[in-house]
Image (cartoon, rainbow, N blue to C red):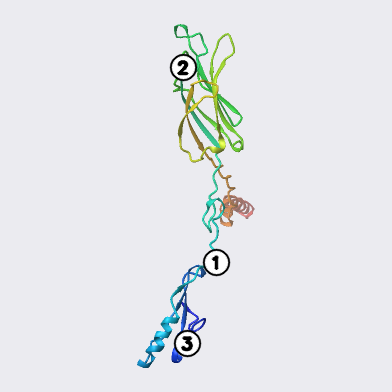
Amino acid sequence: AAAGAGAGTGGVGGDGMDCRQFRLLRDGPGSRWRVEQMLEPTTADDEDALDACESSFAVLAQPPDVPSSPPAAGGAAAGGGAETRKEPTVLRLRILAGHSLLNKDSGFFGDVSDPYVIAHAGGKERRTPTIDNDLNPQWTQGNEFTFDIAGHVAEGKLRLEAFDENTFRKDQTLGFLEVPLSGLPADGAWRRHRSKLEGGGAGELEYELLAECEEEAPAALAPPPPTAAAAATEDAPAAVAAAVVAAAAADEEAPA
């Protein structure tokens, strides 16, 4: 769109030659261009005046008048907000295997650690079965657990600790690991991990996690009150019965 025709800093060339200025605006002040444009001479005598105008004006580009806005906080695009991340309310866990666990038993004739794993999350504790004499155990049963972690995500952790089960003495730890609940994406997808056990030498634990957000079901709505037509239909049998009784009484009172 053209604005300010003939206005601004436009000048007059030799012999009164009119040199008009036209300002073009394109997409607001950030893309402003100024263009000076001359009228074509109508006679040959105006050629010198035209040369004077051409030497006086040029096509100029102006820098933007308004500085660009800084990016929105958090890297969100201008005019849009960052998407709110859902907080998981349920954590599902599968304990799969241990690798190179510590041996806390005698080591003679295959007498090595008898491992099991205890899981803590959301104030609850769960335990796998014990696998006898195995430093590389694999759990296929009794190894899947579900924890309600609503309200525990901000500061809570999943703690997994492996133990060696003993008969005549206290069970001994084979190392532990912790997973912050706040770092779990609530997308309902299983993810496999293999993590080193702290205090467990070269021991590692293999497990799978799934975090999701289970929304509460809406409360059941109360049934709507019956309409007048429905109420009349419900009362119809009583009305018919009353009419029958009244008709019978009238027949009895009528003279023979």
Q: Position of residue 179 (x, y in %)?
A: 54, 32
Three-letter amino acid code of the residue under disc 3: Val
145 in relation to 108, above or below: below
With respect to residue 26, does 237 lie above or below?
above
* Residue toward you, 32 or 149: 32
Kindly report the distance in space between the C-alpha atoms of the residues bearing marks 1 and 3.
31 Å
Which callout, 1 or 3, points at the residue further toward the start of the chain?
3
On screen, residue 70 versus residue 19, left or right, reads right
Q: In this rendering, does residue 31 appear at all?
A: yes
- How far apart are the two marked residues, 1 and 2, measured between alpha carbons? 69 Å
Indicate the secondary structure of the residue bearing disc 1: loop
The residue carrying pointer 2 sits among few (fewer than 14), some (14 to 19) or many (20 or more) residues within 10 Å by Cα, namely many
| Residue pointed to by mark 3 | 12
Kindly identify the amino acid type of the residue bearing the numbered disc 2. Answer: Leu
**Is label 2 in a helix, a strand or a loop?**
loop
Mark earlier in primary sequence (1, 2):
1
User: What is the x, y in percent for residue 199?
Assistant: 55, 21
Residue pointed to by mark 1: 66
The image shows residue 88, relative to residue 249, as above or below, that is: above
Label 1 or label 3, whichever lies nearer to me, is 3
Query: CA–CA distance between discs 2 and 3?
Result: 97 Å
Query: Which quadrant of the figure has residue 137?
Result: top left
Q: Nearer the viewer, residue 197 or 231?
A: 197
